Image (tube, rainbow, N blue to C red):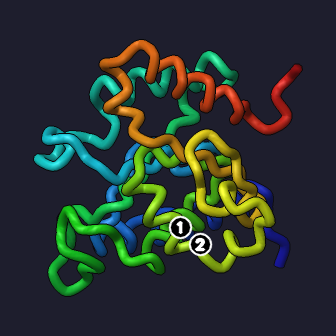
Amino acid sequence: MRVSSSEAKEAVVGAVEQELVSLRARGVVMAGNAFSPIVLVKGSLNDEERTGAVLLSGADGTALRAALGAIGYAPEDFCALASVAGEADVSERAAEPDRPLPSGVFREALEALDPEAVILLDDAAADVMREAYADALVAIEDFDTAMLKPGLVAHVLGRRVLALDGFEASLGDPKEKQRMWAYIKQLPPAGAPY
């Protein structure tokens, strides 16, 4: 039996949808386009996000959308992932709410989203990434890059990974905001025109 390309696409979308529903049931918090080429990982949620606001729906999300748009990402190229657990089905829960996701669950979530680039917005997100991808990070020769030092782009299993050390906190300080912008400019979309 021959499968049309639209049927194949529907099957892929259905499989990803099913995987994302399973992750949400275990407390994984995500927002945005699951097929985005870039995923923004946040570990230190603000008060609004902890009480149910959409991840990166505040000033930090607005600033990130503007920064990503300025380097060539489309408005729909925006996906956020929390490295801490949210509310979940009690029987399925991977971690207590507001606690770091277990490394296996975090890795499963990031692999399900399968981006070409990852921005770790704070130290808490970088810590979870280090633990979840320790096996891949040890293969990186430069120690600072392997430790996801802020501002350095690490190539992890075919993805570009950039750690920032507190994007949301930087918004109140023009000098820190400039530093974050300089870091983000290192991750233009793959195949972006020069």
Give the residue number, with chain letter if any, for mark 2.
133
Figure quadrant of residue 170:
top left
Tell me which residue sits at (26%, 83%) in the image: 92
Residue 55 in picture, x, y percent from top left: 31, 43
Tell me which residue sits at (71%, 32%) in the image: 186
Left or right of residue 90: residue 26: right
Give the residue number, with chain letter if any, for mark 1.
130
- Kind of residue indicated by mark 2: Tyr
Q: Name the image quarter holding the N terminus.
A: bottom right
Q: Vertical placement of 19 versus 41: above or below? A: below
Q: Vertical placement of 147 versus 193: above or below? A: below
Callouts 2 and 1 close, C-beta under 8 Å: yes
Residue 46 in picture, x, y percent from top left: 21, 41
Nearest the eye: 159 or 35: 159
Q: Residues within 10 Å of mark 1 (few under 14, many from 20)?
A: some
Figure quadrant of residue 24:
bottom left
Tell me which residue sits at (72%, 31%) in the image: 188
Residue 141 in picture, x, y percent from top left: 80, 65
Helix or strand or loop: what does disc 2 sit on? loop
Left or right of residue 123: residue 156: right
Left or right of residue 79: residue 184: right
In the rendered image, is residue 33 in sight?
Answer: no
Label tally: 2
Q: Residues within 10 Å of mark 2 (few under 14, many from 20)?
A: some
